[in-house]
Image (cartoon, coloured by chain):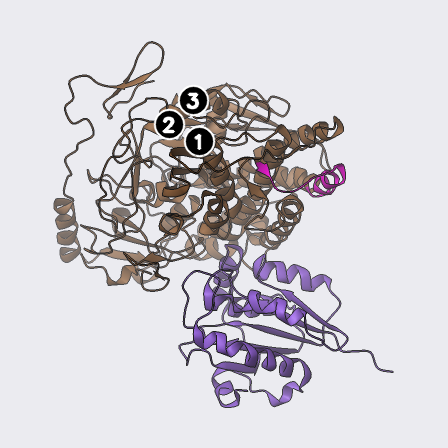
Amino acid sequence: MCFKNLPIEFDEEGRAHLKEGVRDPYTYQTRSIDEQADKIQDLLARNGHIKSVDFDPVTRVAGALAFHSVVDLKERRVLETNSMATLFRGYEIILKGRDPRDAAFISSRACGVCGGVHSTTSALTLEMAFPVVPPPLGIAVRNLLLALEFWYDNPLHLFLLAGPDYSQAIVETTNPEIWEKAKKTAAPHADVHGYRTIGDMMTDLNPLTGTLYLEGLQMTRTAREAYVLVGAKYPHPETVIPGGMSTTVSISTFNEIFSRLSQLFDYCKKTVGIWDDLCDFFYDVNPEYRKVGSRPANLIDTGIWDDPFAYDASYEHCNEWGERRWATPGVIVDGELVTTKLQALNIGIEEFIEHSYYQTWDGPRFRTDPAGNPISPYHMWNKETRPQPTGQNWREKYSWATAPRWDRKAMEAECSVRLWNIAAGGVMPHRRFLEPTGKSVKIHVPESTLPAMDLEWKIPPVWNAFERNRGRAYHLALTTVVAFDNWLIGLDLLKQGKDKIHTAFEVPRKGMQIGAGFWGAGRGYLTHHAVIDDGALSNYQILTPSTWNACPRDPWGNPGPYEEAVLNTPILENFSSPDKYKGIDILRTIRSFDPCMPCTTHIHVDGTDYVISREVNTCACGIDE
Amino acid sequence: MSEAKRIFIGGVGYTNLRDLSVGPIVLPQLQQLDWPEGVEIDDLSLGGPIAAVHRFREASPYDRVVLFGAVARWRQPGQIYLYRWDRSLPDRDEIQMRVSEAVTGVISLDNLLIVGGYFGIWPPDVVIVEVEPCDENWGPEFSEPVRAAINPLIKAIHEAVLASSDRFPTSPAKAWESQP
């Protein structure tokens, strides 16, 4: 594998090094976005049909997101976009100076939906730093727990947050001609999900009253019930710690989990059928829907669910244990998988702040990773979080999200990237329920009330809003069989008497240690990077999937994934006059990413331990052109 | 002999957000006190309003629910407000937004009332005890005004459980006049 934009080369043995003769390898020239902004301002001033359309806040997303766009309602095009994370997640600052063992419990609070994934990512980070390796049962139970967490997350998005965008209530209003057709169109997977027509399905997607909406709410209970059996609490588990789990499990715990897990076998088959039918229906009705939310398939995922018999927590071996995960790590550039190596993935990441409310930091402290591969001054092991909410306008700074880039490209984090990496990578070793084919993944879902089914997710020819949602439905099936596989492994270990679930560790009190947790949330990619000095956290960096997706423009003026996807979205909504325009195509695009903006707002006052929780809720309405 | 009234006392609030943690922090103190037969006390923060909906749908009906916690309404910090919920709900768009917030981790007494109200889990008699917070910083300790309000708050919760709810006003604004 080779970087195209970073000055990094690999030798014949796969070791990375900086290109020779490059004097200041990571330097860059910023590009002003003034010219484009002036052009848009001019168009807005001269044309009545060109409008500023702001969504502030974007509703039906987790946390706080504002979105600014300029649309040409005559040409039905989007001309300009800005994605704005309106809240500041200051956990990096809260964690600074603390005992590393606090990290799993504090970082969990970064999200009210997926707290457990942060706990686990913290645990992995510290396992690498200390080091400590959990016993196989600890890893299998951790895998099971994380799969169950996604059981809360994915149905929530598909039926409560994004689902209503495809409901009768919305479609009948924004595109009545589609609703008329939906009522008469037979649903191809009626035998699986029970809906005779697409219209019936849309009616049950209606918010608050639709059966699918209410069933989605009910599934959150099933997931929570299973989760707390080992996590003790949801969404912030008490039992996920470095070295494994701080709980004990027995065969009866496993049986109680299975009573919930078995309910999911049918639910995921039904969910896949519903989203297959919905996506294909929209494509059939109007092929232009393939362009809604489209952008090049530039995707990144660290992989998730460790092999209990291969994971050793070390950075040195992370390429090997990473490829043995149920979800293969990987980076996809323009639809092609370019690496499945965690080290290559890690060293290619930088975070930029030119359009974010932060100031630069000193350094770099590290020029290489622990394996000797070069890393950028903007890499998370070097980055520091220094809030500075000044210069608020669309040309300068407009978001609390940074602009992460891999090989200086805007990458998208998505749970379905896991499917893509498994399919294209072909290295995933756990084949009891999963079969990568190079172009697809076959998922063998066991029998329950419905018969056993082979669901096949195929690498889509176009990456858009519909494929994100469809992918998330298949991800539910992936999650189910990974949970079942780990349930079987855990049960087998217990039957063999191998019930050790935690490895004791000592927190190093002297010297410097660094670690990284490569894991994932319900939306995909999640990493934590830590530096420990003399027993205390001296730097802690969290990079979430929604930071990748919601990020503002980079130093070169290139848009982030939300911004790019909305720019590529045609306006297909049926409206009689501009004042009736609702922006459903834009909203479908944004929501297809399953935005999860960090929930809690905190800002640290320099030189004190004071943290403000309200004043930094930055609203897009105050931003000037 | 008449059966004891079933009364549920629920605390609501974030953990480790100082004054906003009144619900979960005061709850264990309440559990140590003597209460009449039929009184249950638990935290309704964990899992949020949807978990509460699931729980109440399965429980035998209660005669009264008393909910307490810190709610910022820009009043005098540390003041306590005791009122009867008037059962009014916002429009459907607002309710939908509250459900979205509920499932994505927002913990709020107002959300709990609205989401629970929409899904029909509350008995006719719902009494709210609020304290006005002033420190929404992170950490386990209360601000001075809220710390001073804890004993009066517990007294107010006692009153909310034992007194006839007819004597309580039906909105937090009116409740200003009837602080304990």
**Circle 3: residue type:** Glu
| Crowd around label 3: few <14 · some 14–19 · many ≥20 (10 Å) | some
- Among numbered discs 3 and 2, the one appearing first in the sequence: 3
Whole-percent x, y for residue B105 in the image: 50, 56
Instruction: Give the residue furthest to the right.
Output: B1
Return the mark for residue A345: 2
Please provide the residue range marked out in magenta.
A244-260
Q: Residue at x 28, y 45 (%)?
A: A552
Return the mark for residue A316: 3
| Crowd around label 1: few <14 · some 14–19 · many ≥20 (10 Å) | many
Asked whether, in this view, residue A333 is left or right of residue B84, the answer is left
Whole-percent x, y for residue A547 in the image: 36, 44
The chain identifier of the residue carrying mark 3 reads A
Position of A511 relative to B67 (above/below): above
Quadrant for the N terminus of chain A in the image? top left
Which chain's colour is purple?
B
Q: Helix, strand or loop at disc 2?
A: helix
Which chain's colour is brown?
A
| Crowd around label 2: few <14 · some 14–19 · many ≥20 (10 Å) | many
